[in-house]
Amino acid sequence: MPSRRKSRELALQMLFQWEVGGHEPAKVLASFLPATRAEAGVKEFARQLFEGTVADVPSIDPVLRSHATHWKLERMAAVDRNVLRLALFELTHHPGTPPAVVINEALELARRFSDAGSVEFVNGVLDAVRKDLPAHPHVEAQGS
């Protein structure tokens, strides 16, 4: 079975390249994924996460702004901002993945690609977002 964790790592790396490098999503996909040594299923899920997150940034960022108290999105570390975007996309568009799993995976990404303080920050923001999930239009009732 393809590794969803690896897919999330690849998607995060592409999001970072897209945002920090200012590259078009298609260019990022064309240059990044073929150079990656991963199974086709891993690459495909990474592509879905990356493209979906980029497309949904206009609706993701306001949610993050409202839940990241005392933090401006623009002032967050780029890695943290994109970990949050990726997790929020998955929380809202992949209701089959339990929110606790998505949040745990985001914490692992923050632990691996950011600094120590990022884990607590990402956890706090995503926990606040998770509490509001049933009100989000893309999420089906998950049962508490």
Image (spheres, helix red, strand yellow):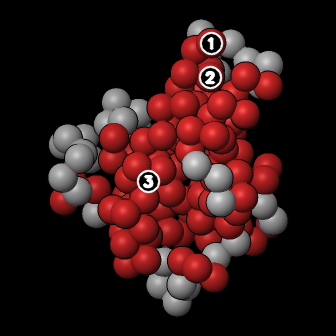
**Could you tell me residue 66's position as x and y percent?**
38, 78
Identify the disc placed on residue 53.
none
Q: Which residue is mark 1?
A: 40
**Could you tell me residue 25's position as x and y percent?**
56, 44
Say above or below: 79 vs 55: below
Q: Which residue is mark 2?
A: 43
Of discs 3 and 2, which sits in the foreground?
A: 2
Q: CA separation, marks 3 and 2?
A: 20 Å
Q: Quadrant of residue 28?
A: top right
Q: Nearer the viewer, residue 102 or 20?
A: 20
Please state if 131 lies on the left or on the right of 5 as rendered. left
Q: Secondary structure at mark 3?
A: helix
> Which residue shows up at 41% across the image and 33% down it?
97
Label 1 packing within 10 angstroms: few (<14), some (14-19), many (20+): few
Q: Secondary structure at mark 2?
A: helix
Q: Nearer the viewer, residue 80 or 28?
A: 28
Say above or below: 108 vs 110: above
Q: CA separation, marks 1 and 3?
A: 24 Å
> Which residue shows up at 37% across the image and 63% down it?
58
**Could you tell me residue 140's position as x and y percent?**
20, 41
